[in-house]
Amino acid sequence: MEKILIIEDNDEINRLLREMLETTGYEVKSAFSGPEGFLYFDQENYSLVLLDLMLPGMSGEEVLKKIREKSTVPVIVISAKNEIESKLDLLENGADDYITKPFDVREVRARIELQLKKHGASGGGGNRIVFEELVLDKDNNTLFANDAAIPLTKIEFSIMELLMKHPNKIYSKQELYELAWEDHYIGEDKTVNVHISNMRKKISEHTKGDYIDTVWGIGVRLKKA
């Protein structure tokens, strides 16, 4: 299921958008200020962000800038500002679309569907999983980082899919082995360690940081670079 983040301080508009999206079948998270919105964004993976500009605590322009420092997730700005210069500035600085208030929810829904189709599924649903610089294309069994294809073995791809689907989850080595190898675990720590080490090396050649985090004594998870 696609997950959408709404950052809008007006209670009525936030509720209207949320109800429309949930009725359509999306999972929705609502934030009512700039800092709250970016906090939610930083904690989870979202397929798309609906962003107001006039927000308490941090302006929508600032939120957009911080999002773009971390992610290419599609962002649709919804604002009462209708000056052409404002729209062009936002589009040039990372917004994917701009909708002027007052709006028709049918238009918002259509714009959202267009962006999701254009960008592919982001998060745990669909055939593409996006996490910061990384894009896992399940149709082609390929991991991309900054548009560069990273060669992964079948097992490495399975491990990466698990980690990217649930980036906040710490997988024990037993869980990784049984889920990726689809076999019974008999203390195969060395096998898991070798695959994780190879994945780190391949990914680091194309990215700004090490995304695979070992939590000593517990297991492995995906982390922000």
Image (cartoon, helix red, strand yellow):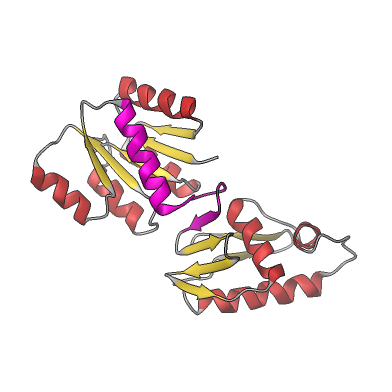
The x and y percentages for residue 77 are 27, 41
- Say left or right for 193 vs 80: right
Figure label count:
0
The x and y percentages for residue 148 are 46, 74
Image quadrant where residue 52 sits: top left
Image quadrant where residue 199 sits: bottom right
Nearer to me, 138 or 26: 138
Nearer to me, 17 or 59: 17
Residue at the limit of the structure toward the top, as seen here: 12
Name which residue lies at 65% across and 78% down. Answer: 198
The x and y percentages for residue 208 are 44, 72
Name which residue lies at 63% across and 63% down. Answer: 160
Residue 21 visible: yes
For the N terminus, the image quarter is top right
Magenta stretch: includes residue 24: no
Magenta stretch: includes residue 109: yes
Q: Is residue 122 above or below residue 157?
A: above
Residue 8 visible: no
Q: In the image, which residues are magenta?
A: 105-131
Image quadrant where residue 48 sits: top left
Name which residue lies at 66% across and 56% down. Answer: 162
Q: Is residue 36 above or below residue 207?
A: above
Q: Is residue 210 above or below residue 170?
A: below
Nearer to me, 35 or 93: 93
The x and y percentages for residue 109 are 36, 33
- Say left or right for 20 vs 82: right
- Say left or right for 221 vs 114: right
